[in-house]
Structure formats: structure tokens, C-alpha cells
Image (cartoon, rainbow, N blue to C red):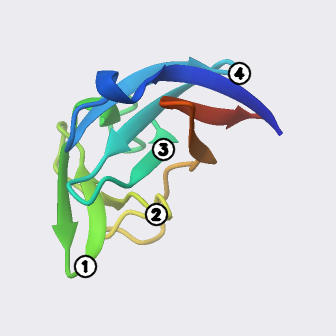
Amino acid sequence: MNWQRICSESDLPTEFGVAALVDGHTVAVFRTATDEVYALGNVDPFSGAGVISRGIVGDREGEPTVSSPMHKQAFSLRSGQCLDEPETRLPTYPVRRRAETIEIAAS
């Protein structure tokens, strides 16, 4: 895999997201309250707006989620699946921590 540096861990606040450009795709990167890090596509599939990184991070029955700031659909941070409309999904990206930085695998 070709790993691309996104930011330092200190630049990614808990329960917030940041947007990044990875291999020509906008990606939303999140850190949860349990200190897990996830990367999803940043474009809301329902509105077409690049806003997922500004969504509200939460939890639905143990599943870490982000809710779109546009129409409030909740997406699993693990799988990208929309929990309100399961036929819709955001792309997910491999993400890792390395030497106190967050990296995402580019294709």
C-alpha cells in the first residue's frame, strides 16, 4: 500500500473530523472518544456536498457513527454503511497511526 501522511495525531481532535485530499479523493478522517481513527469518503451521497468531515461523531447501539450535517443520516465509521438507508454507503479507506501521524492508504 502507498501510505499518505494526513496530519499529526494532535491535529485530529477527539470526536471531530478533518478533510484531506488522498489520491484525488476527498476523505473525512475521524477520531472517536475511544481513540479509534477512521477514514470515509467526504462527499454526502444524498446531497453531493463535501461535508461529512463536519458531521457529528456519535454512537448507535455500540456502532461508532458520523451524522451528515446536511440531512442527518448516520453512517457507520467502520463500514461506511448508512444506518438509516442501508443501500447507501460511503467509501472507507485504510488508516493507521505511525510515529504520531495519521496516514491513509492511497490506491
Residue 69 image-quadrant placement? top left
Q: Earlier in the sequence, mark 2 or mark 4?
A: 4
Q: Residue 88: x percent and y percent?
A: 46, 60
**Tags 2 and 1 in contact by the CB under 8 Å rule?**
no
Task: Using the rendered image of the protein, determine whether residue 27 is visible from the camera's viewpoint.
Answer: yes
The numbered mark at residue 40 is: 3
Task: Report, in whole angstroms, how far the alpha carbon at label 2 lies from the one at label 4.
Answer: 21 Å
Instruction: Mark 2 or mark 3: name the one nearer the start of the chain.
Output: 3
57 vs 103, nearest the viewer: 103
Query: Regarding mark 1 in the picture, which secondary structure is present there?
Result: loop
- The picture places residue 29, in percent across and down from the top left corner, at 41, 36
Query: What distance separates the C-alpha of mark 1 from that of mark 3?
Result: 18 Å
Q: CA distance from mark 3 to mark 4?
A: 14 Å
Residue shown at the point (63%, 48%) measured from the top left:
94
Disc assigned to residue 23: 4
Residues under labels 4 and 1: Cα distance? 31 Å
Mark 4 against mark 1, which lies toward the viewer?
1
Secondary structure beneath dot 4 equals loop
Report the residue marked by disc 2: 78
Identify residue for label 1. Answer: 62
Q: Amino acid at mark 3?
A: Leu
Amino acid type, label 1: Gly
Amino acid type, label 4: Asp
Drawn side of residue 45 relative to residue 31, left or right: right
